[in-house]
Amino acid sequence: MSNTNTTTSLQESDALGKPPYVNINSQATSLRQPSPMPGPKRPGHPRHKSSIRTGDSFTKPRDIEKHSKLPYFLRMHGSITPRMLVPLGFIGLWATLITCISEFVYELVVSEILLTVLGFVVGLGISFRTSSAYERYVDGRKFWAQLSQTSRDLARHIWIHVDERHDADAQLGKADLLGKVTALNLILAFAVSLKHRLRFEPYAQYDDLEQLVAHLSTFAGDAFDPETSELKPKNNWKRGGEYLGLTFAESNPRKAIKRSKKNLGHLPLEILTYLSAYVSATVKGGQLPGGVQEAMVMANLASLNEVVAGTERVLNTPLPIAYSIAISQITWVYVIMLPFQLWHALHWITIPGTIVGAYIILGIAAIGREIENPFGRDENDLPLDKFCEALEDELNVIAAKKPPKLEDFLTSEFNEVMFESCYTDLAGKSTEDIRAGLRARTNFRAGSRRDVGTGVGKNEKEEV
């Protein structure tokens, strides 16, 4: 299908006498389209593909744009139920064993006081675990929201306030324009590289990152070695084990970092260095007039650096291992003791009762473990890929049109300043008349809100 679209685009371009446009990603990614002009190709590194495939149906963040009509209790994607199958199977066998022994051999009964005491402790532990994990999840989302806001602000400042010197020299103006587009590409590269860094993917040769930073000299780009950096793709058994929550099937997420034989550097920080160099060059060249704009741009760069520090704090400061071990042990002791305390009152109903109780307690604890790291590829993690795609689209929108000039929209006949009067109509009136109209507009708005639906506001407008 993509080949057909590419051929059609090329034929349409030839018919219109325009440069050919090749959509290699079948998406609107104008910031990263290859140049249609012929030229020598610079040799690049072989691409490094992530060990977890994007299309993997077992582990990937849930697509928030998709809508499901199923009620929540019937949904499986994003549910913790698949990871509970093995623990619940074990608990079911354990409850069956205790029930059978109590029914046919010897009554294994424990006082209900133990259930009450353990239940209180388990509730406190799970509450602490869940609240701390959700706090980390919210912090991760806040930092990424700060990244999106700062990136849009920085791109707007660069696109609008950095002058293009077309009047001085055509080639110089063209170079300024390409420099601004390059700066916007670096903003996107910063977000994408931070996403990979938070997922312990340390190189620069990923499909969505390589063409954004291939022209930069970085430690991550130089450290790539196809023989040692390539990770083996996971087979179906391993992916299935991870889907079921089996800890022995989980790989070390820092495997790629540990296998590297060279200094991997800090790619997001290096990209910020190149952005700072661009800003410094524009200031020295007089393209960024006024200290206010320069201060705002530098503040945006500092804000992006804060995002790096904040996301790394969330990633590298998990719940202390002592808490995790203690809460896990207390939870399992409580669940294992359930059939001893339920049999006297429920008998054979002890088996499903224990399974239901285990699902509630172990399920809530498992949710806390999953969202503790919000930057991964689990179903309930933040959809960082979607966030980066949204940022790319926003940067494309900013760069789609040349920087607007005030006279382009101020004097337009469609600029209805007040009372359906455009700018050219009011320009012929005196300042006193314009100010009188502004005062009348205040009274008109207040009257319209008081008399909604009565037609009084319309009559007042006609009188004015």
Image (cartoon, rainbow, N blue to C red):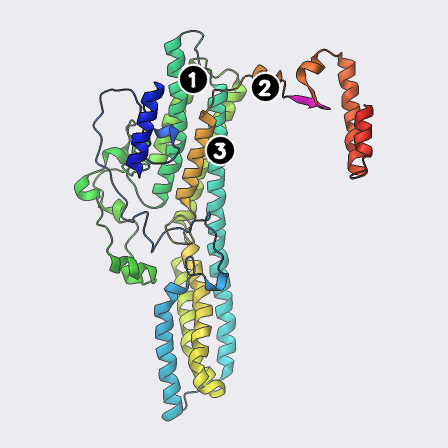
Front of the two marks 1 and 2: 2
Query: Which numbered mark, 3 or 2, is in the foreground of this view?
Result: 2
Location of mark 3 (residue): 150
Residue at position x 49%, y 49% in the image = 138
Comparing 152 with 337, the one in front is 152
In the rendered image, residue 262, in percent from the top left (x then y), is placed at: 22, 38
Q: Is residue 450 above or below residue 423?
A: below
What amino acid does circle 2 point to?
Phe
Helix, strand or loop: magenta stretch: strand
Q: Residue furthest front?
A: 15
Q: Position of residue 363 (x, y in %)?
A: 44, 65
Q: Is residue 55 above or below residue 105?
A: above
Q: Which residue is labeled 2 in the image? A: 409
Q: Position of residue 188 (x, y in %)?
A: 40, 33
Counting residues from the start of the chain, the first of labels 1 and 2 encountered is 1
The C terminus lies in quadrant: top right
- In the image, 67 versus 280, the foreground residue is 67
Element under label 1? helix
Q: Tag 2: Cα neighbours inside 10 Å, few (<14), some, or many (≥20)?
A: few
In the image, residue 273 sits, relative to residue 78, either above or below, namely above
Mark 1: which amino acid?
Answer: Thr
Q: Residue at x 79, y 24 (%)?
A: 439
The part of the chain drawn in magenta is: 415-419
- Label 1 – label 2 distance at C-alpha: 27 Å
Residue 36 higher or lower than 313, as above or below: above
**Which numbered circle lies on residue 99?**
none
Q: Are marks 3 and 2 in contact (CB under 8 Å)?
A: no
Ranked by sequence position, the earlier of labels 3 and 2 is 3
Classify mark 3: residues with Cα within 10 Å, few (<14), some (14-19) or many (20+): many
Is residue 177 covered in magenta?
A: no
Quadrant of image for the N terminus: top left
